[in-house]
Image (cartoon, helix red, strand yellow):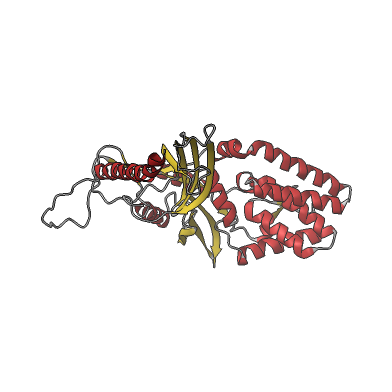
Amino acid sequence: MRTMNHQTPQLLWVWMLVWGLVALVGTATKLQVVKAQPARTSPAIQVAPSDLEFSPIGVIFLPFRDYTTSATDLFYDSSVPGPPEKVVNVWLNDVFKDLVATTETEARIAIRHDVRSRLDKSRRYESTKQVVEERYSLGLDLYQELRLESSEASLNLASKTAQDNFVDIQDPVIYANIQLTLALVLLEKGETNLAHVALKRMFLVDPNRRFTKGYYPANVETALMAAWTDLQQTASLELAFELDSIETLLREVRAREVVTGALVKQGDASVLRFVIYDGAARAFRMREDIPIRQGDPHPIGLETAMSRWLACLPGATLRTQDRSEFPGPANPTRRITVDSGLAHGLYLTRPTRDYFNSLGLVINVGWHAMPGLDVYAKLNLYSSIADPLRDLQGSLTSARLVLGSGLRFGNNRWQ
């Protein structure tokens, strides 16, 4: 027994040496021997080989909006033929549709037409929208009963729920109705500054709204005209929504960029303020004013801007066949990796008179959340082997769960 006890550390070192050699051989088999070749010049632009294909980039299109109406044109006389309650710029809508149709032909872009259905799966959008409408209806009823405090609370709750669940983006008319009623409540309470902010929010998401002349009191009409004028002169109209909300929406529908625009006044002329926002880079890829002429079905400036955008799209690639020397960037999409293997455990502070071994299984699950960041979970399961002196009366089973995050860096081959 004494001899076996002395030989145990030696056997342990031999066992560790064998496993080290096995690991070294396994690593060596994965490495390829690269033969030295004479240096050669390569063209500045290399053609992508046939075993590469582009990974499409998810894009959301938000309709163009028209902010060129004068403040005096917000009201119409219902007794004579005049504009309806909604004045839609048909030319602007046609330009937007042509832009979407043109982009659909680009293989590197996947337009997210099913935004509403994706939101309905992820956060039950339709049910949430119904809740928002019910809270708005309650706030409107309370306002008509002159219960102003309760009405304001209900409308504020409806407004926050709408913003948190993208109702203001997908159904801006509902959100505009909430803001209009909230402004009326605030004006009744004498809080003109807050009412001004609510009216600006209404016009920002729904600039086509018109009002019957004389339907509202004079102070309300004055407040509407002031809010519209202030919005045209001072507000950032091109995106209409908060960047945090846009970025969250892009993550929800697995898209990277949003394309939208606004028709605004610039002096006596009208310009199309064209915007492309990159949610992954958290920056505007394009943000410029394009001179337009009403009636021109294909604005040259817009086509030029689109060409620059398409030419500068990140060329994410996927390898489909053999390895290639084409230096394409890594696929930016999120990845989940799962691997498993045999595990060996050894207690350095042993509960027995001699060392004993534990064998088991290790499972690793990693999620490449974003460039540079990994989130992982590791599960280790061990079961002990009988110790040499039989101090253990039975097998010792243990489990360990490790959760954490890691910093990823390096090129495609070594990370």
Position of 229 compared to 292: left or right? right
Q: Position of residue 175 (x, y in %)?
A: 68, 48
**Residue 125 in which image quadrant:** top right
| Residue at image location 63% in from the left, 56% down from the top | 204
Q: How many marks?
A: 0
**Residue 26 in which image quadrant:** top left
Q: Position of residue 355 (x, y in %)?
A: 45, 43
Front-lying residue, 98 or 402: 402
Above/below status of 202 relative to 113 = below
Residue projecting furthest to the left: 38
| Residue at image location 89% in from the left, 47% down from the top | 145
| Residue at image location 12% in from the left, 57% down from the top | 39
Residue projecting furthest to the front: 2
Position of 161 compared to 190: left or right? left
Position of 279 compared to 307: left or right? right
| Residue at image location 12% in from the left, 53% down from the top | 37
The quarter in which the N terminus is drawn is top left
Front-lying residue, 279 or 198: 279
Above/below status of 128 relative to 267 = above
Position of 14 compared to 68: left or right? left
Residue 226 at least partly seen: yes
Above/below status of 172 relative to 410 = above
Q: Position of residue 202 (x, y in %)?
A: 68, 54
Above/below status of 191 relative to 405 = below
Residue 83 at least partly seen: no
